[in-house]
Amino acid sequence: MKNILVTGGAGFIGSNFINYILDTRDDYFIVNLDKLTYAGNLENLKPSEGKKNYQFVKGDITNNEFVNYIFEKFNIKYVINFAAESHVDRSILGSEIFYRSNVIGTNVLLETSRRFEIEKFFQISTDEVYGSLGSTGLFTETTPLSPNSPYSSSKAAADMMVMAFYHTYGMPVVITRCSNNYGPYQFPEKLIPLMIINSLNGKKLPVYGDGMNVRDWIYVIDHNKAVELVFEKGRVGEVYNVGASNEMPNLQIIKLILKKLGKSEDLIEFVKDRPGHDRRYAIDSSKIQNELGWKPGFIFEEAIEYTVDWYLKNKSWWERIISGEYQKYYYDLYQNRK
Ligand code: NAD
Ligand code: DAU
């Protein structure tokens, strides 16, 4: 049994990871440490609730003493760090919490991991650390880091720290840098769920700038299968890019969502651009494909269709987010039992 600390497991990608892993294997014991910020939602983890190889703990990765206590209590040997403030727009409004959670938090996890001599430290990073591309070219693992937003600069700082712990202390680290994820349980501030939910509510769809910024979209389960593979077989000290070679301008995705929902394009509203808006991201994932045999399993057209249907079928999930009800779920589940 591998005792793994998964941080940020109540967020979008982390909760999908835990649900997927606990559904498919029984050799991991997962401790999910999550602060339950606005982005943390324990309702995402209903499929994993009550499983004997799963334990949720509410806590902040910047809290040194508490993190130390968790490592000791659960005999943690592996860390997968999903925890982060993840939304670029919020980082533009105020950057402090981004540097606190994403940089200081990662440092606390690294220092604790060093003391406990853990067997693997896995940093979940992002393609945004590479900055922005022009109309051609792809990000490879050797593309220089050139982050443009407070969010991406905090993630780049964390990546550099992780590599410094590898070079200085020989810590067994690994990093993945993935492109834009979509799928169930994504917080409705991010492009795809926001556009689906606004369309359903007959609200305007705010398109930044000219709507021609390009993102490289990957279904969340494909990302998480890559995480599982890199966790098991990735070479220590290495970075692996993860992407599904599915570039698309924002406007194209928005129109596709409107079409699928049978809504009018009149809902589209061009608004002021995001400051410092990266123009294009596109990932070269040949390293993970050639070295570890990973490849994306989902076709965009099918997975986006499934995703839109998921938000249609799970209206109460996002309505509880909009009303704020979701934040009471933790108390119903854990606090009221005491
Ligand atoms: P999210 O915002 O949905 O979830 C983040 C989770 O981290 C939340 O549950 C939150 O409560 C928790 N958290 C935040 N600060 C914390 C702290 N100080 N201590 C403990 N928990 C804390 O994010 P996401 O979209 O699931 O992204 C997860 C990770 O993947 C992030 O590191 C992000 O940078 C990276 N990533 C995201 C994408 C994407 O498209 N969403 C792509 C590539 C990489
Ligand atoms: O590339 C990986 C990154 O993808 C992750 O590291 C981030 O955590 C994740 O949030 C995401 O960042 P983006 O900034 O690309 O995602 P977002 O969904 O915020 O925006 C996607 C694109 O859509 C971007 O070009 C901005 C645009 N956009 C977004 C919103 C929320 C709009 O035009 N209107 C909107 O209302």
Image (tube, rainbow, N blue to C red):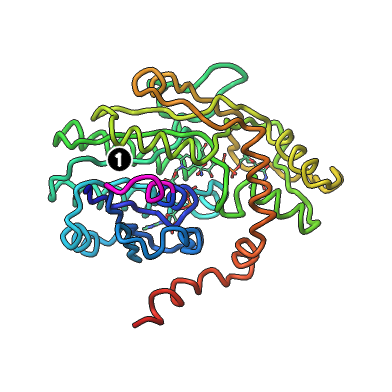
How packed mark 1 is, by other alpha carbons closer than 10 Å (few <14, some 14-19, many 20 or more), is many
Quick check: is the Cβ at mark 1 less than 8 Å away from ligand 1? Answer: no
The residue lying toward the viewer, choosing from 106 and 273, is 106
Name the quadrant of the C terminus. Answer: bottom left
Residue at 41% in and 28% down: 145
Is 133 located above or below residue 16 in the figure?
above
Q: Position of residue 273 (x, y in %)?
A: 68, 41
Q: Three-letter amino acid code at disc 1? A: Phe
The residue lying toward the viewer, choosing from 225 and 243, is 225
- Residue 184 lies left or right of residue 85; in this view the side is right
Q: Quadrant of residue 8?
A: bottom left
Q: Position of residue 211 (x, y in %)?
A: 72, 35
User: Range of the magenta residues?
Assistant: 20-27
Residue at 40% in and 54% down: 9
Is 153 located above or below residue 290 in the figure?
below
Residue at 21% in and 48% down: 1
Ligand 2 quarter of the rendering: top right
Is 322 located above or below residue 226 in the figure?
below
- Residue 148 lies left or right of residue 84; in this view the side is right
Q: Position of residue 108 (x, y in %)?
A: 25, 52
Give the tally of numbered discs.
Answer: 1
Q: Position of residue 293 (x, y in %)?
A: 39, 22
Q: Secondary structure at mark 1?
A: strand
Q: Quadrant of residue 234?
A: top left
Residue 290 magenta: no
Residue at 39% in and 45% down: 24
- Mark 1 — residue? 122
- Most common secondary structure along the magenta stretch: helix
